[in-house]
Amino acid sequence: MAGLLFLAFAYFAVGQAAFTRNSAQTAADAAALAAAQNARDQLREDWLDIILDPDQWEDLLEGQVYDEGTACLSAADYAALNEAALSGCDRLAPSGFRVTVTTTGSEPKDATASAEAVIEPRCTYTKQEPTPDPSPEPTPTPTPTPTDEPDDGPIVGLVCGDDPWEIDPEDPTTLPGAVDLFSVRLSE
């Protein structure tokens, strides 16, 4: 009987340790994803600020310009929701986060786990060159008057996944969302 009680206690202790370890890994995964998603959302907001100047898009579309501190605060919030404390949040090159959390539950022994999440650009931008006028005769160039305004047509050349996007300065309501511009995933 004593042997059976010892085996039951051993199985219980191993099971509880595995549960604590799994809880820590779940918290680390959630925190890493939260940091990367926050950075992705920042990238889209920053892109909206410069949307009419495609010459500035490259760094943003590559996912390299965001506030690391804000993203790590989001990771800390998600770790806390999973009964863990964020003990490390580091930016990965070129774009992503490695977080480490420690469980804060009432377990006899806390567990520590780490996870990495990456932000992957889904878009490319190719600046379109104007097409030459096919007319064989040269036409005289009119002298611009102060009331002439440049013809701002749609910005083309943005391709996200396999979907081409047309950015129309006159109608900015049809813009790609953060999930169209970037994917976020846990790294292997």
Image: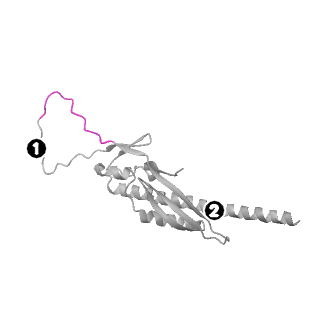
Whether residue 160 appears in magenta in the rendering, the answer is no
**Residue appearing at x 47%, y 58% in the figure:** 97
- From where the camera sits, is residue 89 visible? yes
Q: Which residue is mark 1?
A: 143
Question: Label 1: few (<14), some or many (≥20) within 10 Å?
Answer: few
Farthest residue in the front direction?
3
Question: Label 2: few (<14), some or many (≥20) within 10 Å?
Answer: many
**Residue appearing at x 77%, y 63% in the figure:** 10
Residue 112 location, x and y as percent?
59, 64
Quadrant of the image containing the N terminus: bottom right
Q: Which residues are magenta?
A: 126-139
Q: Which residue is mark 2?
A: 23
Instruction: State left or right for residue 42 relative to residue 16.
Output: left
Q: Amino acid at mark 1?
A: Thr
- From where the camera sits, is residue 52 visible? no
Give the number of marks: 2
Instruction: State left or right for residue 60 relative to residue 179.
Output: left
Question: What is the spatial separation of the Cα atoms under label 2 and label 1, in whole angstroms?
Answer: 72 Å
Farthest residue in the right direction?
1
Q: Earlier in the sequence, mark 2 or mark 1?
A: 2
Q: Quadrant of residue 157?
A: top left
